[in-house]
Image (cartoon, rainbow, N blue to C red):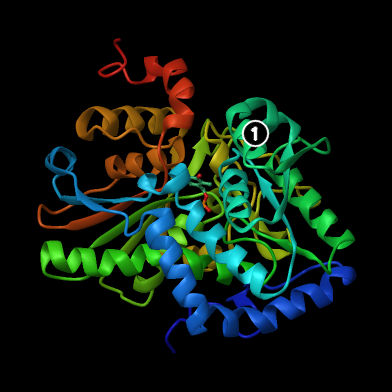
Amino acid sequence: MANNYFVDRQGFYGPFGGAYVPEILYKCVHDLQDAYLPVIESDSFREEYESLLKDYVGRPSPLYYARRMSEKYGCRLYLKREDLNHTGAHKINNTVGQILLAKRLGKTRIIAETGAGQHGVATATVCALMDMQCEIFMGKTDVERQHTNVERMRMLGATVHPVLTGNMTLSDACSEAIRDWCCHPKDTFYIVGSTMGPHPYPDIVARMQSVISSEIKWQLREKTGRDYPDYLIACVGGGSNAAGTVYHYVDDERVRIVLAEAGGAGIHTGRTAATMHCGTEGIIHGARTLVMQTPDGQIEEAFTISAGLDYPGIGPMHANMARAGREQVLAVNDDEAIYAGYELTRMEGIIPAIESAHAVAALKKMTFRPDDIVVLTVSGRGDKDVETYLKNKSLAKEYGQF
Ligand SMILES: *Cc1c(COP(=O)(O)O)cnc(C)c1O
């Protein structure tokens, strides 16, 4: 039997996924499960969504042939430039779609969690666009670390709620957003930022991001004469830019998929965010998936230099594909990501988000044939990470002498 890597009727990807939510959210989540497909497959939704992707987000994002990096790695490397989107990353593809869904479901109040603040900014942006009330939950540690993004959200009209529980980071912000949702199930729509959370969120987010691979198809055909690559490479936090990158290639066995998760200080150091290397089965934020947890089921804190990959879980779609061998997962450590970020900057004139630099670093761990076509998604731009790069420039000695 062929594998089915997409969500089934019950909301599962193999053994992973589902919707493990408190009683009070049951109706809310159930209504969304019933409503989301008819809405997002309707002509009026597609029309409005596609028009906003084009004129507001700035799509299609370019597929750029990276000549110098291709020579260096001995392959034909194309970069999918999600860094050029409005607000600087792929996250806006998803928030534009979800706010249109929220509007069609008659919701008036938007909530969202955020770690680095990228999803918070992307959510606050579409709330300004649609004139909706916007409440963002963000761990206090992240509020302090990512101050510019907090100010951007406030400028866009959102209220930012610093979360004081747990480690005061992304995982705690998710829990707090779910708590708020429980108090306002009727009027509130929760815009989830990645392919995580209870069914149908992983599927909603994957569909919203799938525009990435539908563009790769025609762009590759235009540039190379065939519409599939030999390799797709993307970084994974919760898994949304990766899901978008692979979506239309999942069943095409000619295409090998390589994901880069954040190794932090290293997968054997205990200071890591490499969930697919170090996690075990458990439930986090409404889904059964791989989770970094203690033997008695307490969620462990994730460590990585990259605030956007700092999550102790992983979307159920990727947990399933990785286990089935459809996706190969590499752990990329902080120092490797920093180096790769400098390398892309100096060789192509593109400063990538530190998250995206993890994907770039995967190139070094792979071997190619000269005619291999490789598509690597640059999920976001590195403006927000300049300080981090500078602080760590000693890790990129060839490039860091300035
Ligand atoms: C949030 C973020 C990520 C990680 O999230 P995914 O859902 O795994 O894509 C990666 N890159 C950038 C630039 C981000 O902002």
Helix, strand or loop under label 1: helix
Kindly tell me whether residue 245 is visible in this rendering.
no
In the rendered image, which quarter is residue 102 located in?
bottom right
- The picture places residue 369, in percent across and down from the top left corner, at 13, 54
The front one of 111 and 165 is 111
- The picture places residue 299, in percent across and down from the top left corner, at 75, 47
Among all residues in the image, which is located at the extreme bottom? 1
**Residue at left 77%, top 69%?**
20
The front one of 106 and 139 is 106
Mark 1 is on which residue type? Val
- The picture places residue 253, in percent across and down from the top left corner, at 30, 74
Q: Is residue 56 above or below residue 71?
A: below
* Image mark count: 1
**Residue at left 41%, top 48%?**
379
The residue beneath circle 1 is: 150
Quadrant into which the N terminus falls: bottom left
Quadrant into which the C terminus falls: top left
- The picture places residue 160, in percent across and down from the top left corner, at 73, 39
